[in-house]
């Protein structure tokens, strides 16, 4: 079991499914659980097809160095995007994501459309779209981390554990999980993905890291320090403007 | 086409960061494969990436101060 990969996969998948759960709960409240569950089922089947189709193909046919460079590069772009967004959120340049607000918005959107008997097409499509799009980011994390680190089972275990935890919390609480520190989770995942992406891209290009994979800890430290410097600097710029 | 847009949106939401990352990658290839400075290549890549993040964030700050 690769702990880093499992943790990254758990956090990345968890944060995406917290957002998907908000959509599911809003649709289920207005359009009923039948439409919501049908949407979840269809979304999960689509995601499973993507993992089932691309995972084995990548592992079998793409050479490791090329995979490290290409998948590591995608992971790096994805991680840096999350890291940048998290820094901007902490600094007050972007609104913090709020699940309670997202839930109310979706509730209103669903209430504005007529409820149909049986499976409601609008509700079904909303859940399918939400689960698929949020899940796609999770699948991306699981595939790139799992394949590049050669630890697919760790990545899948982390992702499945996250889905189970989010589903259980949703079933028990029956409300959006706004108490989960989503922005902090996204920041942590951003740092992890950026660090692994950096490590693997450089390795794929032939670079030699000091003490090999241990360097990932230094990379995490560098990205954390970068964020630690950037947030107060950006906050100061806002204060100067005011 | 829509699927490509979705995938692109997953990876890039700021052109400066994406271009900076690409330039850092080119620098990595030059240092690692061209100059054979294998030990330094990774760290030079990191410096390029951190600079790209800084440029992207500073641009965002400048954009906000103008609006």
Image: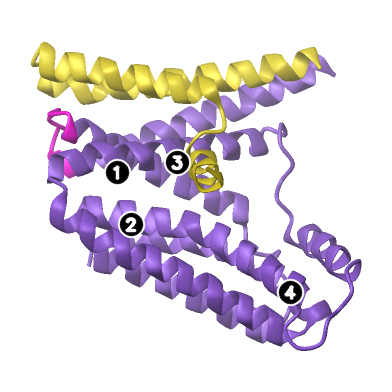
Locate residue A210, reporting x and y percent: 14, 32
Above or below: residue A236 compared with residue A37: above
* Nearer the observer, A155 or B12: B12
Q: Compute the Cα span from label 2 to label 1.
A: 9 Å
Q: Mark 3 — residue?
A: A78
Q: Which residue is mark 1?
A: A71
Question: Callout 3: few (<14), some (14-19), or many (20+) C-alpha neighbours within 10 Å?
Answer: many
The chain drawn in purple is A
CB atoms of marks 2 and 1 within 8 Å: yes
Q: Position of residue A198 (x, y in %)?
A: 30, 34
Label ID, residue A121 = 4
Are both tags, 3 and 2, on one chain?
yes
Residue A236 magenta = no
Q: Which residue is mark 2?
A: A143
Q: Could you say whether the residue bearing mark 4 is in a helix, strand or loop?
A: helix
Q: Earlier in the sequence, mark 1 or mark 3?
A: 1
Magenta span of residues:
A204-214
How far apart are labels 1 and 3 at the CA level? 10 Å
Crowd class of label 1 (few under 14; some 14 to 19; many from 20; radius 10 Å): many
In the visual, does B56 lie left or right of A10? Answer: right
């Amino acid at each position: 079991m690769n702990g880093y990969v499992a943790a990254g996969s758990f956090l990345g998948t968890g944060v995406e499914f917290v957002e998907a759960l908000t959509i599911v709960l809003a649709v289920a409240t207005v359009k009923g659980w039948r439409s919501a569950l049908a949407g979840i089922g269809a979304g999960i089947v689509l995601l499973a097809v993507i993992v089932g189709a691309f995972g084995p193909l990548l592992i079998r046919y793409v050479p490791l160095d090329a995979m490290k460079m290409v998948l590591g590069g995608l992971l790096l772009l994805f991680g840096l995007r999350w890291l940048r967004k998290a820094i901007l959120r902490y600094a007050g340049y972007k609104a913090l994501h709020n699940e309670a607000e997202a839930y109310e918005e979706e509730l209103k959107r669903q209430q504005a459309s007529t409820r149909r008997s049986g499976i409601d097409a609008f509700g079904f499509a909303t859940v399918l779209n939400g689960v698929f799009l949020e899940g796609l980011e999770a699948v991306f994390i699981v595939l790139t981390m799992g394949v590049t680190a050669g630890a697919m089972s760790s990545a899948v275990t982390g992702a499945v554990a996250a889905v189970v935890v989010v589903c259980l919390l949703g079933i028990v609480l029956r409300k959006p999980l706004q108490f989960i520190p989503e922005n902090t989770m996204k920041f942590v995942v951003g740092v992890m993905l950026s660090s692994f992406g950096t490590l693997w891209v450089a390795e794929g290009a032939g670079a030699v890291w000091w003490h090999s994979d241990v360097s990932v800890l230094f990379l995490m430290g560098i990205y954390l320090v970068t964020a630690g410097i950037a947030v107060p600097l950006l906050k100061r710029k806002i204060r100067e403007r005011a | 086409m829509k699927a490509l847009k979705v995938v692109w949106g997953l990876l890039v939401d700021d052109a400066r960061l994406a271009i900076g990352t690409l330039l850092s990658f080119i620098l990595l290839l030059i240092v690692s494969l061209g100059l054979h400075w294998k030990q330094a290549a990774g760290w030079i890549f990191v410096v390029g990436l951190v600079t790209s993040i800084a440029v992207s964030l500073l641009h965002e700050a400048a954009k906000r101060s103008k609006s």
